[in-house]
Amino acid sequence: MTSPQTQSDPQQSWRHQPNTPGSAIDMVWRDLLFMHWRVDAERMQSLLPPGLEVDTHDGEAWVGLVPFTMDRVRLWSLPRVPGFTRFHECNVRTYVRCEGVPGVWFFSLDAANPVAVAMARMVWKLNYVSAKFRVRSEADLCTYEVKRYHGASSRIAWRVGTPLPPTERGTLEHFLTERYCLYSASKGRIWRGMVHHEPWTLCSADVPELDDTLVAAAGIDVEGPPLCHAARPVHVHGWPIKRIR
């Protein structure tokens, strides 16, 4: 288990750029909210597949619940496909390292598009789940309701506050949000997929309503209110996964 607050960050040596060949997906992430809770690092490590190491900040692991909307989705520079270009998502995540490279491990990714769910499970080997979404924006309040066809659900309402200063390396906010690769696992193997976007513009967030069982469904118990940050939209490029172990 590592604490990158005092480590040099190797990101710059491996991060992809928009012109890196082989991009598989192009999209915009919008209406995004980060919610995070502290979790015991040993407990989190026990939930990870062999080969991944829980990433910690000041000795603590974190679990995130992140609702957002994927917009203007396009695959392999092909024309955008009607019915596939925009859908809602909510993921449960934690932060890991493999071979020194920091990234994201997703316990689950609920999405409202069954085609996207099937493709992401096949191409990126991610634990996508089909779910029903009801999303509303009224004045300054955004409400996401997520309901799996069998089981867990989440209802989240938030208001976006004022923009925050850019995050600095070593801070908790940077640790939780500036991640440029994902990890997945299948049949005992570990895979890494790269993403690129400009650094987040984070904003304060007020969350007047949160009723969630998605995090508990991942086997993680959390207590107290989460640390919350809203984010401005970002344009994202993603690359196919590569086996690393």
Image (cartoon, rainbow, N blue to C red):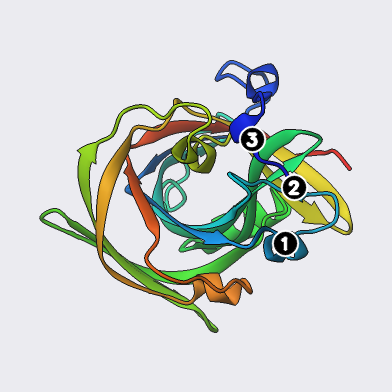
Residue 67 appears in view: yes
Name the residue nearer the viewer: 238 or 183: 183
The amino acid pointed to by label 1 is Glu
The amino acid pointed to by label 2 is Met
In the picture shown, does residue 227 fall above or below 210?
above
- Which residue is at 76% across, 48% downward? 53
Q: Position of residue 37 (x, y in %)?
A: 48, 60
In the picture shown, does residue 198 fall above or below 33?
above
Q: Position of residue 244 (x, y in %)?
A: 85, 38
Residue 115 appears in view: no
The amino acid pointed to by label 3 is Pro
Name the residue nearer the viewer: 181 or 101: 101
Quick one: label 2, few (<14), some, or many (20+) residues within 10 Å?
Answer: some
Mark 2, residue position? 1
Quick one: label 3, few (<14), some, or many (20+) residues within 10 Å?
Answer: some
Q: Between marks 2 and 3, how big is the CA–CA gap?
A: 10 Å
Query: In which quadrant of the rendered view does residue 93 lie?
Result: bottom right
Quick one: label 1, few (<14), some, or many (20+) residues within 10 Å?
Answer: few
Q: What is the residue that sits farthest to the bottom in this orientation?
A: 150
Mark 1, residue position? 42
- Which residue is at 48% across, 77% downward? 213
In the picture shown, does residue 38 fall above or below 211?
above
- Marks 3 and 1: CB-CB under 8 Å? no
Under tag 2, what secondary structure?
Answer: loop
Q: Position of residue 230 (x, y in %)?
A: 32, 46
Mark 3, residue position? 4
Q: Position of residue 68 (x, y in %)?
A: 39, 52
Q: Between marks 3 and 1, how big is the CA–CA gap?
A: 17 Å
- Marks 1 and 2: CB-CB under 8 Å? yes
Relative placement, left or right, of 124 versus 159 is right
